[in-house]
Amino acid sequence: MPTTGLIISNISQLVTCKQGFTGCKEDEDSLGFLENACVVIEGEKIVWVGKQSDFKAENYHFSETIDASGCTVLPGFIDSHTHAVFAGSRDDEYEMRISGMPYMEIASKGGGITSTVMAVRKASEENLFTLALDRVNSMVKHGTTTLEIKSGYGLTLEDELKMLRVIKRLDESADIDIVPTFLGAHEFPPEYRERRDSYVDLVIKDMIPAVSEENLAEFCDVFCEEGVFTAEQTRKILMAAKDAGMKLTLHADEFAHSWGAEIAAELGALSASHLGHASREGLEAMKNAGTIAILLPGTGFGLGKVEFANARELMDMGLEVALATDFNPGSSMLHSLPIVTSIACSFMKMTPAEAVRAITLTAAKALAREDEVGSIEPGKQADIVIISSPSYRYVPYFVGGDIVERVIKKGKVIHTA
Ligand code: NIG
Ligand code: FE
């Protein structure tokens, strides 16, 4: 008789997000629903999924049962784009922005990313770790079970390594999996503003080899944008990272068309984020290359913008769309994926089903984790969220509601409301 740790039974609505659906215009069926369902977990893995009436208790020996009647059970949420390691605060900039000053203007006056860089350079590794662990634990309460975190507030070899070591420690200490991304090309630090190509050389010749030597990053990202890294500089950095064995992603076309989408497709990046000003050709190229669009509605919301990236158009073109928080102290002080789905449904015209898919299976694909997480299927890691609502639609619908009842990571309950 197999031994089993945990049974989730009498589930009112089970959303499996099971693999095998390719179309982007998803009707509800494509989320793989089951009513009055049951999920059996053995150790870290899901071993059985089906109707409660087909469940044979005598086949299993289990130590714990969760009765999920009245609840919806979903795959653990996956946040594929964050800057969750930082020091200091930019609450003053928030007030400047809502009174009308543009993000890029604040940045050009020494605020923006540079102000967080100054705070991170001063902070010890220990201090950064403690601050970030608190944030990660808080994200778990909103259902996040896999989390990508970028460096990019150090911008010296030493400070970038410091951030990446913090991210590594978080992965070892937190209850959830953390995916590390090197973002040394997040901004030009003040000491290199007048000699930008020398900073690009530093990233390529010193930082990428050191990061790869310590095996500290799975992805490399670049902020490809007017006034920040040019298309040519972006291409050079990403090619060096690819040669060093890193997977690629980009901050692309956020404020202006900057050729980010085109470069993402050309270099085979797994994903590109923002894309509010991407060209139709760039998006077509991304679609053909299989690059996933990560949309970040919390950023538009945080910047007080009325225009959001056109998720509907992207999905209708056939692009796969993931949603993420972009959690950072400047443009998106938001770490709840459910709230991100609320903004996406209200302002980007995604359906609740598409939004749920975008924070589970598609987000897993964006992080190259779709064989392990992102859906509730036998053989997958038991990363599961139980919400105290009768339908998955409550994820976007109950804006900021305390609906996350339990969070399960690798078969262990890591949060109970
Ligand atoms: O994705 N656009 C660049 N990077 C972040 C903002 C980081 C910050 O302002 O500190 C973003 O929005
Ligand atoms: Fe970002």
Image (spheres, rainbow, N blue to C red):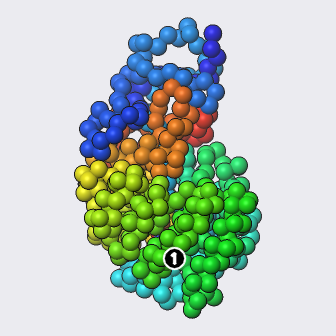
Q: Position of residue 284 (x, y in %)?
A: 30, 59
Q: Residue furthest bottom?
A: 194
Instruction: Identify the residue shown where x is 49% and y is 89%.
Output: 109
Location of the N terminus (image quadrant): top right
Left or right placement of residue 173 versus residue 11 in this view:
right
Q: Which quadrant of the view contains residue 170?
A: bottom right
Q: Secondary structure at mark 1?
A: helix
Residue 81 spot, x, y in % from top left? 50, 58
**Front residue of this view, candidates 200 and 117:** 200
Mark 1, residue position: 233
Q: Residue 411, position in %: x, y?
A: 60, 32
> Residue 5 lies in what quarter of the image?
top right
Q: Is residue 189 visible?
A: no
Q: Please, what is the three-letter code of the amino acid marked with disc 1?
A: Gln
Location of residue 394 with respect to 287 vertically, above or below: above
Q: Residue at x 59, y 57 (%)?
A: 246
Q: Nearer the viewer, residue 123 or 28?
A: 28
Q: Is 182 situated left or right of 406 in this image?
A: right
Q: Can residue 54 be seen from the camera position used here?
A: yes
Query: Where is 327 relative to 179, above or below?
Result: below
Determine whether 85 is above or below 140 in the image. Answer: below
Nearest the camera: 276 or 86?
A: 276
Residue lying at the far top in this picture: please name it: 58
Residue at image position (35%, 82%) is: 100
